[in-house]
Image: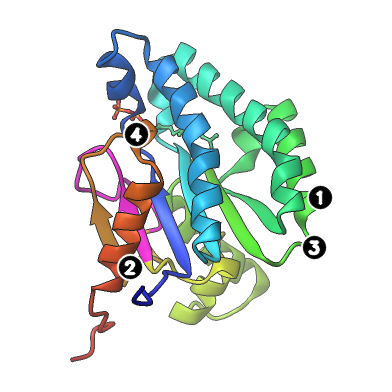
């Protein structure tokens, strides 16, 4: 088989859970459950394909405006996810990092997140960034404030070093499922030269073959980073 180029860092906007559930006559939370189960499948497959770092958009800083019932359900799912998959992640040499403003999350969610981060800190095979209460603009403001606090110069490189995802490098590929063509405040700074891949497939249906299609599409792109 011809060798294909594998993106080192992939970001995913996991959109379409609600529509997936509605198409089945179910409540939106049913879609979030299916979407959550899909996270495990895609993380496993991406790392087995040689992707080094994955950044998943689980909850944006704007998602708090959804009905309370849905927000509560998503928070519950995240807690369950961390509890259930931590062991697996740690065993597979994956370092878990939660990116976004943790201070607004509930104490018990923060506790399971920190357990996961602490127990995987020494892992170096892969990085799994989960974006919760994350916004790209907020991340840039946070990075600049960090520089100001430490008296460092505000430069392009220094801002990059202070981003939540600094250890993963810039995303080579950003995938958005669910048929919308926008970034929705995801990885705005580090995504400056990312290749973008949009698909109509809804997140719970985005399986291993769909990820392979995105990786293959990435392999055929010519990246010029602003040069000729
Ligand atoms: C978008 O679908 C999805 C979200 C806002 C949440 C993403 C969350 C998960 C995939 C589950 C939990 C995550 C982890 C890491 C366990 P939508 O509700 O906007 O769908 P719609 O566009 O069809 O309404």
Q: Nearer the viewer, mark 1 or mark 4?
A: 4
**Which residue was labeled with disc 3?**
122
- Image position of 34 (left or right of 128): left
| The quarter of the picture showing ligand 1 | top left
User: Is residue 118 covered in magenta?
Assistant: no
- Image position of 34 (left or right of 127): left
Rendering coords of residue 91 (x, y %):
76, 51
Q: Nearer the viewer, residue 78 or 154?
A: 78
**Which residue was labeled with disc 1?**
119
Rendering coords of residue 110 (x, y %):
71, 35
The N terminus sits in image quarter? bottom left
Label disc, if present, on residue 32 of the rendered structure: none
Asked if one can make out residue 142 in the rendered structure from this viewpoint, the answer is no
Mark 4: C-beta under 8 Å from nearest atom of ligand 1: no
In magenta, the rendered stretch is 173-187
Spatial CA distance of label 2 from label 4 is 24 Å
For the residues bearing labels 4 and 3, Cβ distance under 8 angstroms: no
Spatial CA distance of label 1 from label 2 is 30 Å
- Local packing at callout 1 (Cα closer than 10 Å; few below 14, some 14-19, many 20+) is some
Q: Secondary structure at mark 1?
A: helix
- Local packing at callout 3 (Cα closer than 10 Å; few below 14, some 14-19, many 20+) is few
Residue drawn at the location 50% of the way across and 52% of the way down: 45
Rendering coords of residue 197 (x, y %):
26, 56
**Which residue was labeled with disc 4?**
205
- Image position of 60 (left or right of 18): right
Q: Secondary structure at mark 4?
A: helix
Mark 3: C-beta under 8 Å from nearest atom of ligand 1: no
């Amino acid at each position: 088989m011809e060798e294909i180029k594998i993106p080192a860092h992939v970001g995913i906007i996991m959109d379409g859970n609600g529509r997936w559930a509605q198409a089945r006559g179910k409540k939106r939370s049913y879609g979030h459950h299916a979407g959550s189960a899909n996270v495990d499948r895609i993380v496993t497959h991406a790392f087995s394909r040689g992707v080094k770092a994955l950044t998943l958009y689980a909850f944006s800083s704007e998602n708090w405006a959804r009905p309370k019932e849905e927000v509560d359900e998503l928070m519950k799912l995240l807690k369950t996810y961390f509890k259930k998959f931590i062991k697996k992640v740690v065993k597979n040499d994956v370092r878990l990092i939660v990116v976004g403003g943790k201070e607004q999350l509930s104490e018990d969610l923060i506790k399971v997140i920190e357990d996961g981060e602490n127990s995987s800190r020494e892992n170096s095979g892969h990085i799994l960034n989960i974006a919760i209460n994350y916004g790209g603009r907020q991340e840039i403001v946070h990075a600049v404030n960090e520089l100001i606090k430490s008296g460092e110069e505000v430069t392009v490189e220094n801002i990059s070093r202070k981003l939540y995802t600094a250890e993963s490098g810039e995303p080579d590929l950003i995938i958005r499922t669910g048929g919308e063509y926008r970034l929705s405040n995801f990885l705005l700074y580090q995504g400056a030269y990312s290749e973008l891949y949009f698909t109509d497939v809804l997140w719970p249906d985005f399986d291993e073959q769909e990820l392979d299609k995105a990786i293959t599409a990435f392999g055929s792109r010519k990246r010029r980073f602003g040069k000729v």
